[in-house]
Amino acid sequence: MIDRLLRRFVFDTASGARCPQLDCRLLLVAITLLTLGVVMVASASLAISERHVGQPWFYFSRQAVFAVLGLMVGAAVLRLRMSFWFKHDRAFLFIALGLLLLVLVPGIGREVNGSQRWMNMGLFSLQVSEPARLFLLVYLAGYLVRKEDEVRASLQGFIKPMAVLIMACALLIMEPDFGATVVLLAAVISMIFLAGVRLPFMGALLMLVGAVLTLLVIFSPYRMRRFMGFLDPWADPFDTGFQLTQSLIAIGRGEWFGVGLGGSIQKLFYLPEAHTDFVFAVYAEEMGLLGVLVLIALYAFIVWRAFSIALVARKAGDVFSCYLAYGIGVWIGVQSVINMGVNMGILPTKGLTLPLMSYGGSSLIVMSAAIAILLRIDYETRCCLDNMGSGSKKPSVRRRRRRT
């Protein structure tokens, strides 16, 4: 019944095309993570909300509003045909670069904890790297469709998208937002690799990226302090290693089955950013190893579905949707791994949210839109394949989109 209501609201099925159901498994997993995130933000932020604003449910209520907005934005994005994204991919590039430039302008960008990543939108602050990342992936997918042969065959075709990527990464580093830069690089490099670029070009790019990121750490004092704190957090547990040691204590307290929802001690002013970047540590303390394994399985399912959707899109001849689904899958997977790895002390500290769970409107809303794009790609491509298999005349993907 829910699927029929969603399809009636989101899609135009008056054409009589035989269209499949939505991917309810992917939708259910995404909503599960969204709901779990609202619950964990409530648990992790009660004490901090009481101290900072005098309202224990402040962050919870805002996260609940962000979740509703995310669902509304997701429903709106689900109505957009993939041809819309392909047609306007260059416009999205300029919007992304414009946002990254505007946030650096004094008086427009807002500085928090030494980073100028946010723009004041009145009711909330927009972290511009979140929509910019999605828009850049849309542009790259369109570029790879238009210039696929050139990217595979010549150095010039390979360098052109890299120039755009370097420009975007430079703007992100100026904020600075090192974590967003790493995630964007991982998604873009994966998309280019899957497009079939020559291995020597890819090898040279990986070495260049590795060298640049290493130099950024070496010549940035605060990044070097973070890195040294990551290598041995217990050497200075009350300064450079404080956040990581408190996170490890929280995870260790969780043991097999956790201390129970709401029972975390580390969230009581011991663990900084407990409801944002380190919500995973609070979750691990309260839900234990079993809960962590369930959470990892949920994220792994989303990544697996993104890659499966990409393969179906390739089969249907929709190369643009294929590349975009790959990019979104890598984005969600890499960001999830980095956030969990930072919380567990496997990776150096980065200011990255846990997708669909950490507190923050920008990340939650943009991630909801990304999931909606995956649902739309899956719907359109399977609709196209189902109608091809029904014995009708084989249509082009673009023509099928106009009738979907």
Image (cartoon, helix red, strand yellow):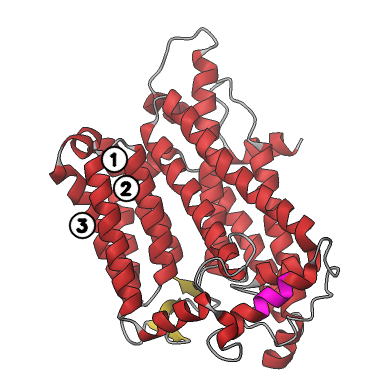
Q: Quadrant of residue 292?
A: bottom right
Bounds of the magenta span? 246-251
- SS category of the residue bearing label 3: helix
The x and y percentages for residue 367 are 54, 56
Vertical arrangement, residue 73 with respect to residue 168, above or below: above
Residue in front for this viewpoint, 388 or 114: 114
> Quick check: can you spot residue 66?
yes
Where's the N terminus, which quadrant?
A: top right
Dot 2 corresponds to which residue? 140
Residue at the location (76% across, 59% down)? 289
Dot 1 corresponds to which residue? 144
The x and y percentages for residue 15 are 53, 23
- SS category of the residue bearing label 2: helix
Dot 3 corresponds to which residue? 163
Q: Quick one: label 3 or label 2, which is nearer the N terminus?
A: 2
Residue in front for this viewpoint, 150 or 396: 150
Q: CA distance from mark 2 to mark 1?
A: 6 Å
Q: Quick one: label 1 or label 3, which is nearer the N terminus?
A: 1
**Residue flagged by tag 3: what amino acid is it?**
Ala
